[in-house]
Image (cartoon, grey):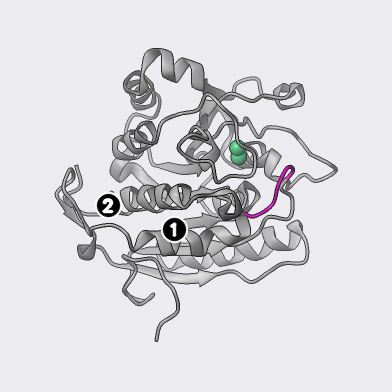
Amino acid sequence: MRALHFADASSDYSEAQVVIWGIPFDRTTSYRPGTRFAPNAIREASWNFETYLFDHGVDLRDIKVADEGDMEEFGSVDEMCEAVEAQARKFQKDGKFILTLGGEHSVIPPVVRTYPEKTAVVVIDAHLDFRDEYLGLRNSHACASRRISEHVGKENVTVIGVRSIAKEDLEGADGLHYIDAYTVTEHGIGRVISELKSRYNGRKVYLSIDIDGIDPAFAPGTGTPEPFGLTPLDVKKVINSLGRNIVGADIVEVSPPYDSGNTAALAARLAREIIATRHPSFV
Ligand code: MN
Ligand code: MN
């Protein structure tokens, strides 16, 4: 019998267009740990859905997806970053579309470093994650967007859904583009998407989804819940609108110990929206 794998991932690595992998790392989590259990919780939840996504006319069985399982445990956050970057480089060399399941947000900067400099990055997050260091760690999950920006340039990053900003986040954040959750609610996600379209105008985009960007009423299973968040449909629409321009993506910060199962289901469903964008006839 094959080990637990993501529902739509029935291809071998060699033939796969999309590679799913888990990085069950939560050592820098500031409030409550548990995201190390997320990859398998999301895999389990993924079996709940139909393979056909009627609104896109896409059957996920027509897309070749491999689930490469999880990275092993690491001694330190720096070791984790090094190993993750090396593995992501291998996926890139083999021409794979990388879909990463965290783990906490600290696992993503090393993935983004394997994309070209100046790649556009869209981050969904309740937090700005722009501290230069947190509790002595530069690779803390509280510094994720800062580390990503150092590689791609902060002028190429947009963070959507922010509603928690520390004063330290703002030191050095001049030129970082973010759209807070109140603005999204006030103007609607449609206007945000138009703004993204004119800003990125057909460019390739890496998409990082910190699940706490979505309101805890919909996504309670996370380490640092923040009220007044985005809706799941807001995030689906962002994925759909970026569509074929997405060059890699992740879903991080799902924490099963605080979940009823709905957060993992939502993460699995968002992962499927991302996979659907790989279909040649995706609209
Ligand atoms: Mn984050
Ligand atoms: Mn966050």
| Quarter placement of the N terminus | bottom left
Q: Residues within 10 Å of mark 2 (few under 14, many from 20)?
A: many
Q: Is residue 81 left or right of residue 217?
A: right
Query: Which one is in front, 70 or 225?
Result: 225
User: Neighbour class for label 1 at 10 Å: few (<14), some, many (≥20)?
Assistant: many
| Viewer-nearest of discs 1 and 2 | 2
Mark 1 CB lies closer than 8 A to ligand 1: no
At 16% from the left and 50% from the top, the residue drawn is: 281
What residue occupies the far top of the structure in this picture? 186
Q: Secondary structure at mark 2?
A: helix
Q: CA distance from mark 1 to mark 2?
A: 14 Å
Determine which quarter of the picture holds residue 16. Answer: bottom left
Q: Amino acid at mark 1?
A: Ile
| Residue 253 within the magenta-colored segment of the rendering | no
Q: Residue furthest right?
A: 136
Whether 32 is among the magenta residues is: yes
Q: Which residue does the image show at 38% across and 47% down from the upper left?
A: 270
> At which x and y percent is residue 73?
68, 69
Q: Which mark is residue 98?
A: 1
SS at mark 1 in the image = strand
Residue 26 point in image, percent of width and height: 68, 55
Q: Which residues are magenta?
A: 30-34
Question: Residue 170: percent from the left, percent from the top?
Answer: 70, 22
Sequence-wise first label, 1 or 2: 1
Instruction: Look at 54% across and 58% down and name the residue there.
Output: 38
Vertical placement of residue 71 versus 143, above or below: below
The tag on residue 276 is 2
Please tell me whether the stretch drawn in magenta is mainly helix, strand or loop. Answer: loop
Labels in figure, total: 2
The C terminus sits in image quarter: top left
